[in-house]
Image: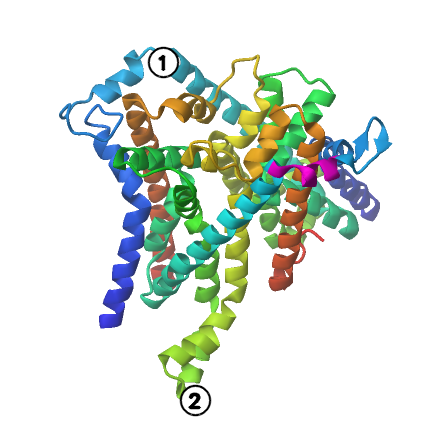
């Protein structure tokens, strides 16, 4: 019986083999190819593409534009989103009310962006940095609200009551209890807004009439022009940012450790 | 009390901001306009144009491609993901961790990096352009979600149930179909629903991997190529309105049902 069970344990494990092979081919290998394209020039190890990237004015301006739009949009999302998350808890909003804030996320971002663009154009608002930041905030605000709302609603209410019993007023209770305890949510909200903002493709092009190219757009442009080397370097930089922020997030959410990368 | 009113006022303001573009598009879809003007008066012309415009064949083709790719890739991703989950769950601890981490990559990675890496890969190994590339790409970013929605069901399962089935004389195959699969079915269904939606919704990976020579467009890439330069034609107002209503209504209905059944459970529990 035990022998039979062992034999089948082995068989059940084998169900994963096809997907492991698939994963290696379609997830790992493409990333390896990016790495090779970035650092191999004519079959030799070279930092040429990396130097080219940093020497080029256009990529540096894309990088600084991305950082600026990313930071600004993330800051505004936090500023607008935190009160939403907090108030939703305060008034004990039902699930459906919370859902109302998340729903727009499920409509294709291209459609929402084109709709906002059409509105800007018909109002005669000049497309530029301002409209790009607005578009990003509009698109990614739900990503800020959701994680913060989840962490705040998980805070044990007795902490707040205890602080009030010990003489804290509402402001103190918020600053000293709720705010510190909601930091994991804030961190995860920040990454969930910042990463897509700088890496997304099309939103900034559409909302600035092609004037502002963020990191994601520049990666696409590089590959369209056949500059695979520099494009790969930029993709690797993006990948590093993603992995770093994911590592940061796993530090704040130890319970999800198994799921996080490294 | 005043504070609560303030909170509610703020929430209402943000909701309004979030929904204004959507509402404006829906309202103006009934005025046959591309520029938000009431000049042409109320009409259903925008909706008629979906079927009579010179772009109708392209639009319908894009719609067909979108659903074709979404159905094929989400079915394949679900089948592969279901078997893979059972396998991964029974892997040795260390291997399991590595596999789960790699499986996580497409989810955390930025779409543009995933898109260009697949593009380089397809070009390097000269995969046939068009549907093959698109479906393979869609499967590779859908399957991780299927696995993520099945794994918790396996973890919650009482391991003894499976062994009890074997003890009671079930063949391993029977134990699989009569015990394991029924337990993970909710996960399979939500995984399928998720990959179907993600595939329908995808723009970046499709845009970069569709190839220029094939002429294959999905709804999102067609919207992008058509509306990027010239702005929105009246029929797009109608198309967007239909999409808004379908997406929002579906999600509302699903969630209302969930909330209702949870409430039922709560009252029963009492």
Image-based side of A174 in relation to B241, left or right: right
Identify which residue is drawn at 57% across, 12% down. Answer: B213
Give the colour scheme shown. rainbow
Residue A166, percent from left and from top: 43, 89
Task: Please tell me whether residue A111 is drawn above or below residue B158 in the rendered image.
Answer: above
Residue A27, percent from left and from top: 69, 35
Q: Nearer the viewer, residue B159 or B98?
A: B98
Q: Which quadrant: the C terminus of chain B?
A: bottom left
Task: Please tell me whether residue B213 is drawn above or below residue B160 in the rendered image.
Answer: above
Residue A68, percent from left and from top: 51, 49
Looking at the rendered image, the disc whose residue lies closer to the viewer, 1 or 2, is 1
Task: Please tell me whether residue A27 is drawn above or below residue A198 in the rendered image.
Answer: above
Q: Nearer the viewer, residue A45 or B29?
A: A45
Q: Is residue A259 visible?
A: no
Question: What number is the disc on residue B55?
Answer: 1
Residue situated furthest bottom in the rendering: A166
Disc 1 packing (10 Å; few <14; some 14–19; many ≥20): some
Residue situated furthest right in the rendering: A44
- Residue A48, quarter of the rendered image: top right
Disc 2: host chain: A
Tell me the element at label 2: loop
**What span is in magenta?**
A49-57
Query: Which residue corresponds to mark 2?
Result: A166
Disc 1: host chain: B
Residue B129, percent from left and from top: 62, 16
Q: Which quadrant: the N terminus of chain B?
A: bottom left
Disc 2 packing (10 Å; few <14; some 14–19; many ≥20): few
Are labels 1 and 2 on one chain? no
């Amino acid at each position: 019986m035990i022998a039979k069970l062992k034999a089948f344990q082995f068989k059940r494990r084998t169900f994963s083999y096809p997907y492991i092979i698939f994963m290696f081919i379609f997830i790992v290998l493409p990333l390896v190819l990016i790495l090779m394209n970035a650092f191999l020039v004519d079959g030799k190890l070279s930092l040429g593409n990396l130097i080219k990237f940093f020497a080029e004015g256009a990529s540096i301006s894309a990088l600084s534009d991305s950082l600026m739009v990313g930071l600004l949009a993330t800051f505004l999302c936090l500023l607008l989103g935190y009160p939403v998350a907090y108030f939703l808890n305060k008034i004990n909003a039902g699930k459906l009310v919370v859902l109302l804030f998340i729903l727009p996320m499920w409509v294709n971002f291209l459609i929402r962006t084109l709709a906002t663009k059409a509105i800007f154009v018909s109002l005669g608002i000049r497309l530029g940095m301002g409209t790009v930041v607005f578009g990003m905030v509009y698109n990614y605000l739900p990503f800020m609200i959701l994680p913060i709302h989840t962490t705040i609603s998980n805070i044990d209410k007795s902490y707040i009551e205890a602080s009030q019993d010990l003489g804290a007023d509402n402001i103190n209770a918020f600053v000293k209890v709720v705010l510190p305890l909601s930091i994991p949510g804030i961190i995860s909200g920040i990454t969930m807004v910042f990463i897509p903002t700088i890496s997304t493709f099309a939103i900034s092009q559409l909302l600035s009439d092609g004037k502002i190219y963020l990191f994601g757009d520049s990666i696409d442009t590089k590959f369209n022009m056949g500059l695979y080397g520099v494009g790969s370097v930029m993709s690797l930089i993006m990948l590093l940012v993603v992995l770093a922020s994911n590592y940061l997030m796993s530090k704040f959410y130890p319970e999800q450790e198994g799921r996080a990368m490294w | 009390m005043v504070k609560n009113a303030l909170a509610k006022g703020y929430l209402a303001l943000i909701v309004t901001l979030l929904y204004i573009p959507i509402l404006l598009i829906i309202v103006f879809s009934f005025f046959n306009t591309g520029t938000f003007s009431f000049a042409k008066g109320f009409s259903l012309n925008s909706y008629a144009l979906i079927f009579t415009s010179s772009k109708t064949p392209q639009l319908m083709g894009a719609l067909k491609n979108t659903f074709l790719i979404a159905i094929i890739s989400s079915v394949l991703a679900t089948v592969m993901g279901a078997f893979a989950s059972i396998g991964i769950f029974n892997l040795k601890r260390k291997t399991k961790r590595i596999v789960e981490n790699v499986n996580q990559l497409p989810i955390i990675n930025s779409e543009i990096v995933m898109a260009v890496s697949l593009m380089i890969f397809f070009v390097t190994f000269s995969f046939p352009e068009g549907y093959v590339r698109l479906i393979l790409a869609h499967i590779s970013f859908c399957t991780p979600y299927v696995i993520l929605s099945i794994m918790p069901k396996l973890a919650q399962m009482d391991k003894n149930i499976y062994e009890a089935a074997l003890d009671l004389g079930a063949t391993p195959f029977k134990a699989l179909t009569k015990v394991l699969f029924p337990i993970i079915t909710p996960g399979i269904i939500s995984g399928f629903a998720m990959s179907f939606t993600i595939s329908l919704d995808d723009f970046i990976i499709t845009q970069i991997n569709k190839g220029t020579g094939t002429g294959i467009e999905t709804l999102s890439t067609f919207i992008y190529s058509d509306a990027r330069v010239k702005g929105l034609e009246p029929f797009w107002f109608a198309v967007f309105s239909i999409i808004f209503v379908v997406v929002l209504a579906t999600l509302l209905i699903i969630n209302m049902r969930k909330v209702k059944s949870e409430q039922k459970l709560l009252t029963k529990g009492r």
